[in-house]
Image: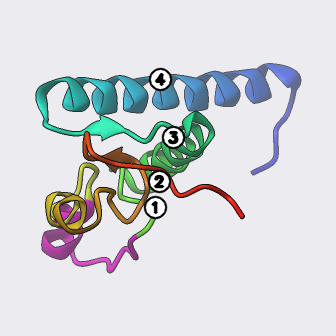
Amino acid sequence: MAFKNTQEVIAVNDGVIQVETDVRQLIEKYVKTSPYELNPDTKKVDKIIKNLARRKLKYGHQYCPCRMISGNEEMDAKIICPCEYHTEEIRQNDICNCDLFVSPNYKPVPAI
């Protein structure tokens, strides 16, 4: 994508920032009504939200960044965040595969 002027770059950046804000609000709203929490690693959460926003801009939906998009609309609907798989992943591991949602019992593994 070639930009003609700085105004176009600013408009695109504002659009990305708005989508990130919208995605963050949706995720925070979900956490308030679910039994889950956001990962306590805020840098990781910020990175995941950026990736969700990029996917929303590119594909029209906030597909989980840890899942491959197949192009099959019915299958891909299962991976729109919060995806169909996160509850079972959290039940088994206290954290979803994307590292976005955790159980209240989640204990981060210290870095070695």
Between disc 3 and disc 2, the foreground one is 3
Q: Position of residue 14 (x, y in %)?
A: 63, 21
Q: What element carries label 2?
A: helix
Q: What residue type is labelled 4?
A: Thr
Q: Which amino acid does label 1 sit on?
A: Pro
Do callouts 2 and 1 mark residues in contact (Cβ within 8 Å)?
Answer: yes
Q: Which residue is drawn at 51% across and 22% down?
A: 18
Cα distance, mark 4 to mark 3? Answer: 13 Å
Q: Residue at x 37, y 59 (%)?
A: 64
Q: Mark 4 points at which residue?
A: 21
Q: Position of residue 33 (x, y in %)?
A: 12, 27
In the rendered structure, which disc, 2 or 4, sits on the residue that comes first in sequence? 4
Q: In this view, does 99 lie above or below 68?
A: above
How many other residues sit within 10 Å of disc 1, few (<14), some (14-19) or many (≥20)?
A: many
- Looking at the image, which residue sits at the far right? 5
Do callouts 4 and 3 mark residues in contact (Cβ within 8 Å)?
Answer: no
